Image (tube, helix red, strand yellow):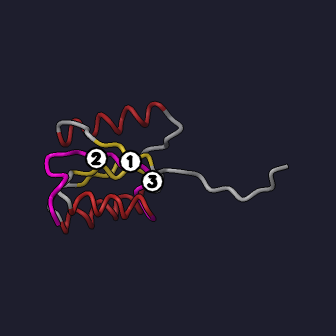
C-alpha cells in the first residue's frame, strides 16, 4: 500500500465486524495506528489482535457504546495515551432494527 495514513491515529467505531472491521484493517495497512472500538468485546479484541499480528503494535481495542459520553471520553483518552493523539474518527457504529413504521 501507499502508507497514506502514516503518523495518523484513527478511532473507528463499530470496528468489531463488517465495514468497521474492514476500515480498521485498511487504515492499519495504510500506516495508521487504530483504536478498534465496539460493544462486542470478544470480536473487537480479536480484530485488534489480528491487526497487531499483521502490523506490529498498531491497534488497540476499547469498549465503546456510542450512546454513552463516558465511553467516548475513555476511547479518546485511550487513543491519546496509547498513540499520543487522535486525528481521524470513523463513526461507523449503528443499530439495525427491523420494525414497521407505524
**Rounded to the nearest whole Å, what is the CA distance between mark 1 and mark 3?**
9 Å
Q: Are marks 1 and 2 in contact (CB under 8 Å)?
A: yes
Circle 3: is it few (<14), some (14-19), or many (20+) Cα within 10 Å? many
Residue at the spot 21% in from the left edge and 51% down from the top edge: 33
Give the position of the N terminus as an image quadrant.
bottom left
For residue 57, side relative to residue 49 (left or right): left
Q: Which residue corresponds to mark 1?
A: 90
Of the numbered discs 1 and 3, the one sitting upstream in the chain is 3
The magenta region covers 1-18
Answer whether residue 42 is visible to the viewer in this image: no
Can I make out residue 29 in this image? yes
Q: Is residue 14 left or right of residue 80?
A: right
Q: Kindly identify the residue that appears in the image at 42 percent across and 49 percent down.
A: 13
SS assignment at label 3: loop
User: Which residue is denoted by mark 2 in the rendering?
Assistant: 10
Give the distance between the C-alpha atoms of the residues marked 2 and 3, in whole angstroms: 13 Å
**Which residue is located at x 80 percent, y 51 percent?**
101
Q: Residue 102, image x and y in percent? A: 85, 49
Of the residues tagged 1 and 3, which is closer to the observer? Answer: 1
**Separation of residues labelled 1 and 2 (CA atoms):** 7 Å
* Disc 1: CA contacts within 10 A as few (<14), some (14-19) or many (>=20): some
- Asked if the magenta segment contains residue 63, the reply would be no
Secondary structure under badge 2?
A: strand
- Tell me: residue 41, above or below residue 70: below
Q: Could you tell me what secondary structure mostly forms the magenta stretch?
A: loop
Image spot of residue 9 (x, y percent): 23, 45
Which residue lies at the image location 62% right of the left edge and 56% below the top edge?
96
Residue 67 rendering spot, x and y as whole percentages: 53, 38
Amino acid at each position: 500500500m501507499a502508507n497514506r495514513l502514516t503518523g495518523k491515529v484513527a478511532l473507528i467505531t463499530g470496528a468489531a465486524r463488517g465495514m468497521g472491521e474492514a476500515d480498521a484493517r485498511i487504515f492499519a495497512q495504510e500506516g495508521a495506528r487504530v483504536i478498534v472500538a465496539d460493544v462486542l468485546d470478544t470480536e473487537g479484541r480479536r480484530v485488534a489482535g489480528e491487526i497487531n499480528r499483521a502490523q506490529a503494535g498498531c491497534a488497540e481495542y476499547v469498549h465503546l457504546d456510542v450512546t454513552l459520553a463516558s465511553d467516548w471520553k475513555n476511547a479518546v483518552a485511550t487513543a491519546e495515551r496509547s498513540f499520543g493523539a487522535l486525528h481521524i474518527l470513523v463513526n461507523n457504529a449503528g443499530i439495525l432494527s427491523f420494525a414497521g413504521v407505524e
